[in-house]
Every structure is written in C-alpha cells, then in structure tokens.
C-alpha cells in the first residue's frame, strides 16, 4: 500500500513540497522582526554612538504608534550585547514580536553607569539617553511619544542605569526594571581589585574615583525617597548566586520599609547571560501589563 501511494503521488509530492515551502516561509515571516542600527549623535559629548532598534513584524503593516522599551547593557559591554550574547539570539526579537513593542538598545560605553560625569564632557550618558536617544527614536519611528508608552530596563550596570534614569526623569518613563542591578555603587570600592575599579571609574569621577561619598550619592539604593515620590511601576530581580544579590536584597528591604510598591524576585542563577535571557521575558510581561493599563498596548 505504501509503494502504491508513492507511485500514484509523484506529481502530488512536488505540489506538497511547494505548499510546505510556502507555508513555512510565511510562518517565518509572521515572526520576522526587523533590526535597525542607527547612528545617534550626541551634542553633549560631541560624538556619535550606535543603537540597535528592534521593530516588531507588525510595525510595517500599519500606521499605529508603538510603545518603546529602552534596554540597557552592562559594564564592559556595548549596545549590541542583548542581540549577540544571549544563548538564544532571537530572544529580544521574539519579545518585540510577541508584545508588539519597539525595543531600543542604546550605547552606554563600558563603565559609564549612565551618569553625567562631573569632570568629563566625553561621558554624559544620562543626558545622552534621556534627551538625545529618546528624541532621535521618537523622530525616526512611530512611537507613543509620552511616558505612558515608554519603559526602561537593563542588566547589571544597565539595571542601575534603568532605575537611576527613571528615578531622576519620571516624566519620561512609566515603568523601570533591573536585572542583577549594580544598585549600590558604594560596594564597588570594597571589591577586589580596588585599583581596577578606580581606574575604570576615572572617566566618570576623575580624581574623585576613590571618594566613597561620591559613589554613595549616585547609588540607586540611596534614592528611595525620590523613587517613592515618583510612583513608577518597578520590577527588580537577581540570581541567588549573583555577587550582587545582597545589594539587591537591601534595596528590596528599603523599598518595603518605605512602602514603595514593586515586584521583586530572586531566582536560581548567577551573573550570566543564561540568567538574563530567562529574566527578560518576565520583565517584558510586567511592562506589557503596565502599558496595557495605560492604553499604550493593544495586544
């Protein structure tokens, strides 16, 4: 019977292969987000940096405006990390498609901590992200140009950056998230090798890179009053084997004590891309609920 089926369906086999190829191709297209690489100039720093922008597949099919997630990289990293370093290279692109959200990954240099350096005009990343990057994205794409459609998150140094920037600029974001965040800059000077930390922070703090008070003044863990006043939706997580777990636990304790609503999770894992790949979907799900409540997300 099997041989007879093959004999009478030689022509049909070709047709089935064509149909399969067509269906398969259309399945791929249904989840084919677009990745743009933009050059975003900085007047504040007198230079230009690249940013990766993931557009969901639906973006090209209509004229609707889209919410935006600004996704920050960590120390020693660059703008393309979230696309190149996750075990599954489609993680960010899949989430953009799943939630119909634009995801922007800007440059933050290797150790800027997303601060405006008081001593170095070439390291003004608070101004760059909050003024120049957001302005460029809103002019280039169909975004919801309002805080109700704009969220920010990041890993490690980027986790600090997301909480720091949202705390200082609550007019720009409706929610913020930190994964394995370096939320207490003051602990950096206590880590070995101390000389390496001081050297890395010199572009930010210059000859004050040994000043403990300066680190404390810029640490997210010391911004509880500002965070409470802003009333932004917050999601924070960290792996139980991460060297930054204790500062994150302390941030959680302080937020609880101050009665600041927030989502806090500890999961198995360390300071690794495997952990962050697993954590990001939870954060985007959290953001999607906030955006929906704001009327900024339709799916």
Image (tube, rainbow, N blue to C red):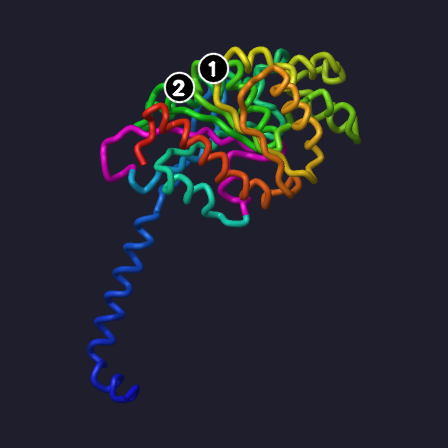
Q: Quadrant of the C terminus?
A: top left
Position of 236 with respect to 52 (left or right) is right
The disc, 2 or 1, on the residue closer to the chain's N-terminal end is 2
* On screen, residue 159 above or below 21: above
Residue 170 badge? 1
- Residue 56 is marked as none
x 39%, y 40%: residue: 35
Q: Is residue 68 magenta?
A: yes
User: Against 110, is 130 above or below?
Assistant: above
Q: Quadrant of the N terminus?
A: bottom left
Q: Secondary structure at mark 2?
A: helix
Locate residue 269, reporting x and y percent: 64, 43
Could one spot residue 122 in this view of the protein? no
Was residue 118 drawn as part of the magenta stretch in this picture? no
> Image point 53% across, 21% down: which residue?
261
Whether the residues at callouts 2 and 1 have beta carbons within 8 Å, the answer is yes
The relative height of residue 81 versus residue 207 in the rendered view (above or below) is below
Please state the horizontal and vertical placement of residue 100, each as a whole percent of the image. Answer: 34, 37
On the question of residue 52 being in view, the answer is yes
Position in image of residue 257 (x %, y %): 64, 17
Query: In the figure, is residue 215 to the left or right of 273?
Result: right
Badge 2 is on which residue?
A: 147
* Residue that appears at 24% across and 67% down: 18
Tag 1's secondary structure? loop
Rendering coords of residue 229 (x, y %): 52, 11
- Spatial CA distance of label 2 from label 1 is 8 Å
**Magenta residue span:** 59-86
Residue sitting nearer the eye, 122 or 211: 211
Alpha-carbon neighbours of circle 1 within 10 Å: few (<14), some, or many (≥20)? some
Badge 2 density bin: few <14, some 14–19, many ≥20, Cα 10 Å: some
In front of the other: 36 or 154: 154
């Amino acid at each position: 019977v099997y041989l007879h089926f093959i004999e009478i369906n030689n022509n049909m086999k070709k047709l089935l292969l064509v149909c399969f190829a067509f269906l398969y191709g259309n399945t791929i297209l249904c989840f084919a987000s677009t990745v743009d690489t933009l050059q975003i100039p900085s007047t504040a720093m007198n230079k230009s940096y690249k940013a990766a922008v993931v557009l969901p597949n639906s973006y090209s099919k209509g004229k609707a405006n889209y919410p935006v997630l600004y996704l920050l990289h960590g120390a020693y990293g660059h703008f393309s990390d979230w696309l190149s370093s996750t075990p599954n290279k489609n993680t960010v692109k899949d989430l953009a498609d799943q939630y119909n959200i634009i995801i922007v990954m800007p440059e933050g240099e290797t150790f800027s901590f997303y601060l405006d350096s008081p001593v170095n005009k070439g390291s003004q990343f608070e101004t760059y992200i909050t003024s120049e990057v957001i302005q460029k994205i809103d002019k280039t794409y169909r975004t919801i140009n309002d805080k109700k459609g704009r969220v920010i998150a990041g890993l490690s140094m980027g986790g600090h950056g997301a909480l720091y920037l949202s705390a200082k600029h609550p007019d720009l974001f409706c929610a913020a998230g930190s994964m394995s965040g370096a939320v207490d800059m003051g602990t950096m000077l206590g880590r070995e090798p101390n000389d390496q930390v001081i050297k890395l922070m010199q572009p930010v703090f210059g000859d004050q890179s040994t000043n403990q008070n300066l680190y404390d003044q810029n640490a997210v863990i010391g911004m509880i009053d500002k965070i409470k006043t802003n009333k932004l939706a917050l999601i924070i997580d960290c792996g139980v084997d991460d060297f930054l777990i204790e500062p994150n636990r302390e941030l959680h304790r302080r937020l609880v004590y101050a009665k600041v609503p927030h989502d806090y999770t500890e999961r198995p894992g360390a300071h690794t891309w495997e952990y962050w790949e697993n954590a990001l979907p939870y954060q985007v799900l959290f953001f999607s609920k906030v955006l929906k409540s704001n009327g900024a997300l339709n799916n």
